[in-house]
Amino acid sequence: MNPIRIGIIGSGGIVKTKHLPGFRKLKNCSLVGVCNRSTESSKRFAQENNIPKIFSSPEELIHSKDIDAVLIGTWPYKHCEFTLKSLNADKHVFVQARMAMNLEEAKKMLTVARAKPNLTTMICPSPFGFSADLTIRELMANNFVGQIISAKYTGLEKYDPEAKLTWRQLKEFSGLNIMGMGIYYETISRWIGYAKEVVAIKSQIVAERIDSSDNRLKKVEIEDDIILTGFLENGGAFSYHFGCSNYPPVELLEIFGTSGTIIFDFQTNSLKIGKRNEELKENIIPENKKKIWAVEEDFIDTIQTGKQHEVSFEEGLKYMAFTQAIHESGNYKKIISIAPLLT
């Protein structure tokens, strides 16, 4: 097969440190061109990373005959626009997470993708929990915990009121996405299933921060503490807390069932399991069961073989529906059912 020729729109930190070396390892693709927010940054990136061509606009890159696939590495505010333009130009699409600004944009992206079944669409998957992913899936498939009674996730970053404002805290760039909620929900849902309904309590601990781009004091638009609760599609209850604390960071998932318990620490990649009435013991994950985050290889493989790897636009739509439900629950102070949002 001819190498898949890739064009990059937006070359931020993840693109530079992960995707660029990931694609460079592959013999069946080539990095052809780049377009950043400015010509200067495009030139700098191209020179530093040996990219042959600089495009003056995203549209020029998308419509170039030298490009087969578009890597959209921008912030979420441009994901929908560039995805639709790329698909309509018959280009494969790899888009950075999160999928979109909101559920409406995600639906548009999925609709156009379904109308172009010959094209590959993929969202960059969550890198968290990869070491334990296969093991936890196997435990859940073998009914280790029995019926889920409840699942609890605690994700607390270290409280820092002096930290600079970033694009993740501005709605014009992030939309409805909140902190690391979406990326952890994506991972957790593969293990315990998606939420059926949700109640959200959102709060703002730091109201203003200095913008790192212009050193001006600005309002923080996206909440920095959120507690979510409700029921899963399989009937179990869930409680997810994303926020900050004066204690060291915490990233812990606890799954409690009628037959057993699973506890996974995302920071240490340690897994503890135990059957009912038994002591929890550390489960050593064999090396051959530890997944490798090879998203670039997966993307090219999907283009060439048709095998869909994670994350599909269908899966992205589900976590964007959860994000939308959180927004509506927080605004209207009520329980939000997720199924109606997907219709």
Image (cartoon, rainbow, N blue to C red):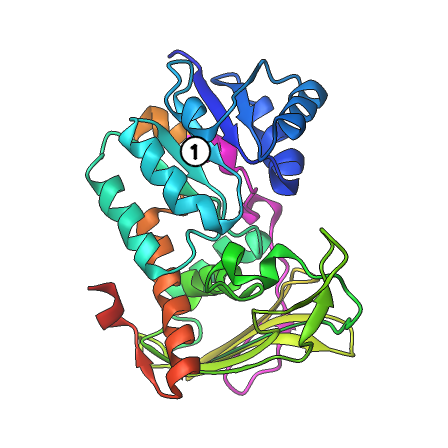
The one nearer the camera, 330 or 139, is 330
Q: Nearer the viewer, residue 106 or 313?
A: 106
Q: Is residue 258 visible in this depiction of the protein?
A: yes
Image quadrant containing the N terminus: top left
State the extent of the magenta-drawn residues as a range.
Answer: 273-299
Q: Residue at x 56, y 69 (%)?
A: 222
Residue 310 visible to the viewer: no
Q: Is residue 80 left or right of residue 268?
A: left
Question: The C terminus appears in which quarter of the rendering?
Answer: bottom left
Give, as a three-letter code, the residue at label 1. Answer: Phe
Residue 316 occupies which quadrant of the picture?
Answer: bottom left
Count all numbered tags in the image, as a single digit. Answer: 1
| Residue appearing at x 57%, y 63% in the figure | 180
| Residue position for label 1 | 299
Q: Is residue 3 above or below residue 132?
A: above
Residue 287: give x, y in percent of width and height.
Answer: 61, 46
Give coordinates of residue 66: x percent, y percent.
42, 14
Q: Secondary structure at mark 1?
A: helix
Residue 46 shown left or right of residue 32 in the figure: right
Is residue 295 placed above or below 340 in the rendered structure? above
Q: Is residue 59 left or right of residue 104?
A: right
Residue located at (67% from left, 76% from top): 207
Query: Is residue 283 one of those drawn in magenta?
Result: yes
Q: Dot 1: within a 10 Å radius of its alpha carbon, few (fewer than 14), some, or many (20 or more) residues?
A: many
User: Which of the 4 quarters of the picture holds residue 13?
Assistant: top right
Q: Position of residue 75 (x, y in %)?
A: 53, 48
Q: Residue at x 26, y 68 (%)?
A: 341
Q: State the residue in front, 26 or 115.
A: 115
Query: For residue 277: magenta?
Result: yes
200 up-or-down from 38: above or below: below
Counting from the top left corner in percent of width and height, residue 235 is at 32, 81
